């Protein structure tokens, strides 16, 4: 049973810690590089789209002179590279610019929306991650049995349906036909969503269903491979109870890949909630990005996309660190 992650020889604590620290520093440096590239791509894309930002701000009735004055005031008459350097320099100093839609600094507005999305994503993770791993392991214990067939069928169906369809079905069933929960999470952006837990049930439920479909099937596939390993078979033949085989020998080896996928999903929950937040009128980062695109609020789009990219990167980093802590072999 020497292949189990718990039975692997460990490095001295000092060397173990240096490997982990070096890994984190390298990943942070890579994340910084990725954010710089994302900022360049985002700035280029939003500034080469058809149409004129000044005209979008002023409306169709603006005169050419008014449009010219606004363009000069917004710096749109300067070369693209100069505008990027000015924007990224201000961003490095904590200045995200002024929202064209709200007419106030983006930073405080974005932080409030980010907090709301973090609450939604955090609750989804606390419920969905353990449940997805548990369902994947349960399905893998009896491959092609009735329970595995039921869980797999649910996962395939949930994965095939877009989130807006699942959300609309949830609103139809639980808000219209059987009015138990509010179909909208509409609230003031500065209001704490935890003060209205009933408004969080449906959006969290839609996100959890999506997470179960994706993470559950990945965990099932990983668990089947681990359960067929020689050291697992040896443990079973020696009479080790099935629950102990799963918890002490299988889980340490199947958790790292599952956690890596959960890290990706963490970034999605923070920044990729455009569909769910728009559908339920939830005042989060996804809805803010959707409104900014509709209004052609370029500074808000740039800042929001950068925060979303940072959320994905940090989610992956946290997942990799958790995998290092769980599996000593990754630190050797």
Image: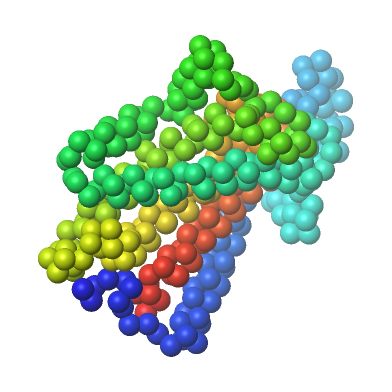
Front in this rendered view, residue 213 or 310: 213
User: Residue placed farthest to the top in the image?
Assistant: 177
Front in this rendered view, residue 304 or 259: 259
| Quarter of the rendering occupied by the C terminus | bottom left
Residue 302, quarter of the rendered image: top right
Q: Can residue 53 be seen from the camera position used here? A: no
Is residue 268 left or right of 327 when viewed as pictured? Answer: right
* 293 versus 181 height, above or below: below
Q: Where in the figure is residue 321, as x and y percent of width and height?
A: 48, 66
Front in this rendered view, residue 165 or 195: 195
Picture residue at 24% right of the left edge, 48% below the top: 140
Q: Can residue 144 be seen from the camera position used here? A: yes
Is residue 213 left or right of 315 when viewed as pictured? Answer: left
User: Residue placed farthest to the left in the image?
Assistant: 237
Picture residue at 57% right of the left edge, 47% below the top: 122
* 116 versus 88 height, above or below: above
Picture residue at 81% right of the left edge, 24% below the top: 58
| Quarter of the rendering occupied by the N terminus | bottom left
* 36 versus 22 height, above or below: above
* 144 versus 166 height, above or below: below
Count of numbered marks: 0
Residue 283, quarter of the rendered image: top right
Is residue 165 left or right of 121 when viewed as pictured? Answer: left
Front in this rendered view, residue 209 or 127: 127
State the colouring used for the structure image.
Answer: rainbow
Picture residue at 43% right of the left edge, 49% below the top: 130
Q: Where in the figure is residue 320, as x and y percent of width and height?
A: 46, 63
Q: Where in the figure is residue 45, as x and y percent of width and height?
A: 59, 40
Is residue 144 left or right of 30 when viewed as pictured? Answer: left
């Amino acid at each position: 049973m020497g292949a189990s992650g718990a039975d692997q020889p460990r490095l001295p604590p000092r060397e173990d810690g240096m490997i982990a620290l070096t890994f984190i520093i390298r990943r942070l440096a890579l994340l910084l590089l990725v954010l710089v590239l994302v900022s360049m791509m985002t700035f280029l894309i939003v500034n080469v789209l058809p149409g004129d930002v000044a005209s979008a701000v002023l409306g169709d009735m603006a005169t050419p002179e008014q449009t010219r004055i606004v363009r000069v005031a917004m710096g749109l008459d300067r070369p693209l590279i100069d505008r990027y350097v000015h924007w990224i320099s201000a961003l490095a100093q904590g200045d995200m610019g002024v929202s064209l839609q709200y007419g106030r600094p983006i930073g405080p507005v974005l932080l409030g929306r980010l907090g709301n999305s973090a609450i939604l994503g955090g609750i989804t993770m606390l419920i969905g991650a353990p449940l997805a791993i548990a369902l994947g392991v349960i399905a893998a214990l009896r491959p092609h049995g009735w329970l595995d067939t039921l869980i797999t069928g649910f996962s395939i169906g949930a994965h095939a349906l877009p989130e807006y369809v699942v959300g609309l079905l949830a609103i139809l069933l639980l808000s219209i036909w059987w009015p138990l929960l509010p179909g909208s999470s509409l609230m003031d952006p500065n209001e704490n969503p935890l003060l209205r837990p009933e408004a969080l049930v449906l959006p969290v439920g839609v996100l959890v269903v999506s997470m179960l479909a994706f993470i559950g099937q990945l965990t099932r596939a990983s668990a089947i491979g681990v359960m067929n390993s020689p050291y697992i078979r040896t443990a079973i033949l020696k009479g080790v109870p099935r629950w102990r085989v799963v918890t002490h020998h299988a889980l340490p080896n199947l958790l790292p890949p599952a956690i890596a996928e959960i890290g990706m999903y963490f970034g999605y929950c923070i920044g990729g909630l455009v569909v769910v937040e728009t559908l339920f009128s939830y005042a989060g980062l996804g809805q803010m990005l959707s409104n900014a695109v509709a209004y052609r609020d370029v500074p808000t789009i740039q800042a929001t996309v950068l925060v979303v990219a940072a959320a994905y990167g940090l989610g992956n980093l946290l997942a990799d660190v958790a995998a290092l802590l769980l599996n000593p072999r990754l630190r050797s």
